[in-house]
Image: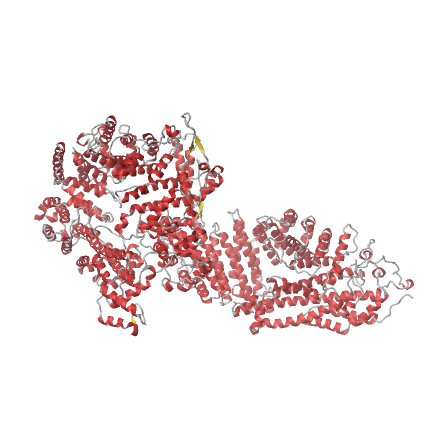
Amino acid sequence: MPGLWAPFKELACVITAAIGQKRPEMFYVLDSVLKKHKPDFISLLQNPAKNPAQRAALQKAPTDGITIPSLPNVHILPQDFVDEALILSDILDLNEMSAAELLLAGEQQLPRFPGLTRGLVAVLLYHDGRRNLVSSLRSLIQAREGLSWTLELSPTVASLVTSFTDQLFEDDLVEKILGLLESISVDRELEKLDRGRAIGKTWHRQQLVSMVEEQRLCLAECLFYWASQNPFPKDALMAVIKHLKGTKKPDEKRPLDPVTSSLFFSLVASFSVGSDVAAEGLDYEHYPVVKDRTLLPTVHNELQKDSEWGCPPMLAALKFAWGVLLRECTFTAEFDGLSELEEDEAFVDQALLGGALPFLQVCVVGSKSFYSEEYYVRRTHWLVTSFISNMSQKVRELRNQADEVARETLVRMSEGEAPLLNERKDFEDLMRLVGDLYISDPHQLNLSSEFWNHPDSQYRRLQRAPQRQVSLFKFITICSSLLPAPLFASFMHMLCGLSNSPEAAHHCFNFLKANSPSLGGGGPSAAISLDHFFWSLQNYYLGLRKDGAVRQTATGCAISPLELEGLRAVLKLIRTIATESEGARVVMYENQTWLPVASLFGLLGCAIPRILKADILLTLSAFATSPEIAGSMWLTVEISQILNTVPSPLALHGGPSSKQEGSIQVELEEIESKAEEYPLTRAFLTLIEKLVSVPIPSNLGTGHRIPGFQPYLEFLRDSVFLKFDTRAYSDPNEKWQVATLVLEIFYKLLASHVISDEDFVIHTYPFSTPGVPPGVLPGAPGHTLFVHMMTQSPLLKKLLAILDEGVATMSAIFEPRAIAEKIDLTRATLCTLKLLLSTLAKEEEFVTHLRQCSQSQSLVASSLTELLQGINPRTEKEDHLVNVTRCVALSRFTPELSLEAVRVLYWVCHSPKASRDLVATILGDKDVSMEILQGFVEHLEWEEFDSVPVTEVQEEGFSSVGQVHCAVQLDILKLLASSINMPMVHFLLGFDVRSRKQTKETTLQDPGVLGSSRTCLHSILSLVEHSRDPPHLQDYHYQFPKLAQLCYHVLQLMCYHPDLSTPTLRYLRNNHDFFHVQLSHLPVATPLETRGEGPVSLLHQQAGLLQMVAVEMRVTSLAQLRSHAQRLLGLLLDEAVAGERGGGVQRKVLRLLEAVDFGCPPSPPLGVVEFDQKAVERTMECCEMVEYCTGFRYTDVRGLRAVLVEELRRFSGAPTAAQRQNLVEEIHSILETVVERNRCLEVAHAHSTLFKAWQQLLEVTLITLGQDPMPLEHKVLIIFEILQELLLKVERNQSSDLVGSVHGTVLMLISHLKATVSLATGQQSDPVLTVLYSGPLHAILKGLAESILLSSSPSPQGAQRVRSYLYGSLLSFLHLTSERPAHNMAAASLWEPHSREGLVRDESFSLLNSYGEPLMETVCRDACSSQEVCRMLSLALLDAIVTFDREGRWLRFMVAKGYLQKLCASVQWEDEALQRMLLPFPEPLKALYVYESKMAFLTRVAQSSLGCRELVNLNVLVHFNECRFIDQRPEAPPLPAHSLPTNFIPSVMSRYQQLLVPLFKFLSALVSTPGPSQREATAQVFQLLAHHSEVLSRVLKDQRGPTFDLTALLELQLVTAVIGKCGVGHDWTNQTSSLAGGLMRIHRLMVSLLPFYCSHSTWKQLVGMATAEGSEEQKDSVSSEEVFIVAQKICCNVVDYARAAMTTGRGPEHLATISCVLLTPDLTEAIFPARSTSGGDTPSNLSRPSLGMLVRHIKECTEGYLATFESCQAQSKKVGTPGAMSAEELRQLLPGSGVGIPTTQQQLVARKTLESLVQHKKLQLELYIYIIENCLYILWRHLSFYLEQCKPVDLEPDLVLPGLTSRPAMRRLQGVNETSLSSTTGQRLGPSELSEGVRSVDIERLKTNATKCLTETFFKKILDAEEAHRASNAGLVSFIEAQVRRLRRLLKLKAAQPVLHVS
């Protein structure tokens, strides 16, 4: 035998999957396991024999080791393990090796059984394996094809099972089972285990008892199922009879045990000849009684042997069944000639004499297992009805005998004698048997309807009633005709049983009504009529009321015992009919002749026995089931004063109240309390419970007392509930029955109460009695109960006491019999939990209303959660919440107890304090913590879902225990999900909850490892992993999709949680390989037969799993766990499975996308006629709710129905019947539409959720893919495949709600593709796009363009969002096709127009242009008028398109259609919005970002000659002249320039710079674009600058110091660039307008910048500040180079302006002259650089700049050029060989020192960094050359002026050259004289004016110093720099050499000439 537990467990799983779940794919698995286990079935439950050799080998295992079949290698076993295995072998009489395997299995399963040792667990597994084996045999026999039922299995499976079981039957299966039933005994098994001390505590013992009993029951049921499907042949039948002979006689009132019942019914099922199913056409040959002629005589003779039977009543019952069989055989021709058939009546007589009917009634029908098996009921029904219909004469004979006995009994009673005790009561027993048989119908068989003949004439016309039914109905008429009084109660009992369904109750009502004389009935059955019943009640009432002093009998009233029995029977029958049939109930209530309610209430006020009063109240409760009757019954209850509610006059004036005689309160306190029995109180509570199911009348008691329910509530609370445990009870269970009834009333009142502000307002009620002060109206009863529940009230204390006692009592009970005895305590505890739950669910709303109401200040309420944390008086601990939690582990009493406990915890765990305190209390008791944890685990792993349908229930009204368990599982998972942040949930999931740090550092283990317990996490994993292998029991993903969805949701939340994520991911990854295994099973196919929530939940399951995989991939990628990340990546991207399209291959990432339906049907429209559609839509919005798990918003259908019904009730006017019917039908139509809409929206939301999860996984996959060493071409192809698939799907479903999300994904993919192509271009010599080319690229472009056009039509909501994604995608695509590898000149050449890549770019743009004006119109329209994001992206797209549009087609279209003009004008229109951007607290910055996009587009347009001309023609700058935001520059911030903003919103200065910088970029483009319109553009820009000169002055002032703010430096660079470019052709010093002052101020400020930024030290200072004080991002080398370049550019701009200011003129004749002298003739700074102050002072502190500063700067730039050139050459060499760099060099080039980056990735990043550095160096070199060239020109012009044209002021007047006689005004100490800056005449200044302040000594010193500093070495360095620059830039034209030559000549000619001085 391979094993005694695991193989049998697997066998049971396979059989359940193949037979129970009817999975056809399990056929071959079933066939193999049946062949494998056939020896086990043949040797049923026989242990493998002991083996001395194995025993010896096991004893040597501690030293030599041993090989066990379940362990492949040789293992050394501990000595204690060997000893324990040998003991187990001796106890169970088991093979030693099997005992060792069993003990190993026990050790493995130890975590599932906390508190037990491995040996005790092994014993449990042993019996569990035996139970699985016999239950598998039972399932196989039940699945056989036979006579009674069919499981509708596939023919192959049915044939396999039938043939297999036939082989077992031929091998004496029946005898083996009977032998096992004799040998297996609970007592013997326990005795055997007890001897070996193999029994643990009570729970372990009870588990063993249950398993052994289940083994016996399974064996017995095997025989019953076989006999029902295929009746036993003679030998088997005789064997069963022989076995039953030994059955001991039970007590008279003791039912049969389940095993004996199964054996008994197996015989009854075999006593059949098929007459009960002959109508179905079955062949008689299937019955051994017919087939074997010797069977009948043999069994007949055996049953005649009375003396051998240990239980004669059982023999009598079998004789009764055999007699009925004999009578049926007489109707079959096959039995002709058998003499035994003549003895049928004799057998029946013997059976009746032996007590067959009482045995059937008490022992068979009364057994607990009778109604659990449907075919027990059917066989008994067949037995009874066959006797009645086939032996009608015998029935009449029994009736006659009963009449004789009844008459004799009446005579003896009239004479005062006692009736005889030994009289036979066979007919009475028959009626009682019939009543007991049909009184319960749990299977809804409705068999009692066969007794009623349908009086409906239509039925009779359609079909004639069967003869059997006629006979049965005739039996009822026989019983009712002239029925004597002693038989009356039995007949009423029978009618109660025959009225057990609505249909049967209706027939019974019609039968009783037909016998009523008032309705035309009468005759012999007149006494059995409703007239007689109700008239009798009225007569009793009238008689008892008229003469209350009538002689009392022994019963305490004028009603005899026989009458009392009859009255109670009548009331029971009326109660049954009223309960089952609503029509009969209403007819009886409305009949004015009967007046049942009035008569019954009248009797309550008479002197009748308490038990009769209780029956009356119960009957009234049945009538109160109808809301209409209950509403009017409230007034009757109040008038009858059953409970004294009207206070006495003395009480109204403040005196004591008195109790009314006959009140229920008096009965309770003075009569029932003494008798210790409380039937009347329980009946009254039942009536109140029915009455409170309808709204309580608000005017109840008006006119007599303060109206309301308050007196009844006070009686229930104070007199009944608070004192229920202080009274004595003869039956202890009655105490809990009373408590349960009161708690049910409280729960109904509390649950139905709607909290409102009116509850907290105090109202008074004025009494009509003079002198009586007005009373205070009490609140609604629900409100009063809420107040009691939320304060430390006696009511709440009593509830918590009930909870405490219930938990303490139930926790110690495990035996089923004891559990059944505590059912009332269980119900009381359950009601307590329901009350707590209802209060917790509404307490927040209650507290909210309490705080808002001003009149409720005197009411102080606390949170119930806080009250539950109070001290328990019994234990003196804070353990009320622990008691609630322990209820989860008490599902053995009822699973509803666990359900309510979990729901209470759901609300309690919302409080962090309560959760922490609860966990702390639980952890204080190890046993309690293990009990609670085990309770949760058992619920999650509960697998007996056979009776649960596929659609899981979540609401009340469970139809089976399986549904309750399923609801418990769902609620536990909801608890875990909703409170994932709470310590209680962390404890349930297995985390260390002592502190948050320890929670994060928890190491999760498998159960049993290092003492780890089995937790909810392990259970959840077992659920989601359970169905991956076909043989397993439950396929949760399909059968219970909601359950699996919540499991994945909890795991997803754990993976997302900051404290739980790391331990969870590590455990799932290392211990289960969870992500790879689960992902390998995706996508999950939705079965066609699945309906309802199944497909939706399957989609959510996959979405949750994909999100978890995305987190895992990202975490493993960041943690450098490459193997895990690459496994998942390979699984997603490998081409493993052939796709459906064209037989190609498809990656898993694309197959996952197939599960998303992009064509979900739209929601149905809401068509209304009678109601206002808008009002209905608003109501639906108010009724919207959000599902927690998925976030799906749906309309609450129940709430909507309540609102519509209330609206119908308040309908203005009295609607006609037709109008009301139309309204009702429209309400029904609206609700149906809402249900369908919810379904459509739920499906669409599920697909959207799955797609978003797929999108998230795809994004993480692409990120991980970027770090993978996969070839770049492969990466690009993968992205292209996904792109094409997405565009194909969205092309087919343009109306789908997922279009926006799909295009967002397309944007992300194209961005990744662009990044990948860029990366590939940098790594390879050839661009990666060589593998893509026109086909895929054009397909993508075509899809994008067509999608834009489709979304531009009158489109659904969200079209602009869709187009935003499309514009972004198209923009990225254009950048992709225009990606130019500028760093690689060889690759860059491929991008020329003649290259293949250039052709791809041109073809793509041609394809885009082929869509013509519709596409242009759409993009341009969105650029001018759409949402902000859409406008920005459309402008960016136009920017890119204009860049590539060589022909200017798009620009011309914009000009022709007026779009460009509108864009230009919109700047002025949005001026106010832009001004608001400069407020301290601005509105959303949308206008700012749109402005930036607009200016970027206009800048791009201005960069082309055509665009510049059109902009000039449109006078674009006129609009900017009118913009006031330009002039609103804020003050410079006091903080250091490098300080960063502390919030998201930029500072005011930053926002202004965001406005100004784009403007000056645009102006720079206008003045820089060559073309015929350049001069006019420059003039317009000049005018704009003149209009805003004040702002320019502030910019130049604010940015003159050595501050580091890159944005400010960029601002200064642009401003100086525009001013410098406008200086060409414009004389800033020669303006006649009113703007001349501002322009002169700009001129001075520009000149003042010259000494500061023409300083290499200033540049280095800015770079140093960037390195020392910038952010981390700014500290890298690239940012430093950027700052250096910006400083260089500012210097270039200033030098440009200086050059332009010197040479500004009106014609070519002025080019050789200087118009403005900017530098003083001082070269000292060039000779002594240490004296320079230009690098440290601001320009305001500097004197006029000198020529020495210029010469020094030229030297610095020359040296800087040479150094930079060498550095650039060295770094350029490194770019080609990144692998040759040392580790230190790599570290310096990597961000963050390259920690955690792979070597290949390090080299790649280093290469890109080097390439960037090289580009920056090259740009610096170009700027150096430019600065040197312009500075040389300025130096030459100044030297030329000073040495050739300058007239010193100290020269003789007569020596002044002609034309130079004018005298200048006095020169200012600093700067240039105002006269020298401008001329009012508009004429240029002469040399005398320009020479102001220059003396001869200055000129002499200039000549001397010039020869010192302008040496050949100086010129040689300059020429060397030019030579190096020319060498690296072939074809470059430079003027440096010419400038050097001019300077040399000038110095040579003029430097040696003396200067004339004045004598």
Colour logic = secondary structure
Q: Position of residue 1921 (x, y in %)?
A: 70, 71
Q: Please say whether residue 507 is visible from this viewpoint.
A: no
Q: Quadrant of the N terminus?
A: bottom left
Compared to residue 278, the image places residue 784 above or below, namely: above
Farthest residue, direction top: 770
Q: Is residue 924 left or right of residue 1665?
A: left
Picture quadrant of residue 73: bottom left
Residue toward you, 553 or 1782: 553
Residue toward you, 1788 or 1241: 1788
Q: Please say whether residue 25 is visible from this viewpoint.
A: yes
Q: Position of residue 1669 (x, y in %)?
A: 63, 62
Farthest residue, direction front: 655
Residue toward you, 1354 or 238: 238
Q: Position of residue 599 (x, y in %)?
A: 27, 30
Q: Is residue 491 left or right of residue 1322?
A: left
Compared to residue 731, the image places residue 710 above or below, namely: above
Q: Quadrant of the C terminus?
A: bottom right
Q: Position of residue 1287 (x, y in %)?
A: 49, 56
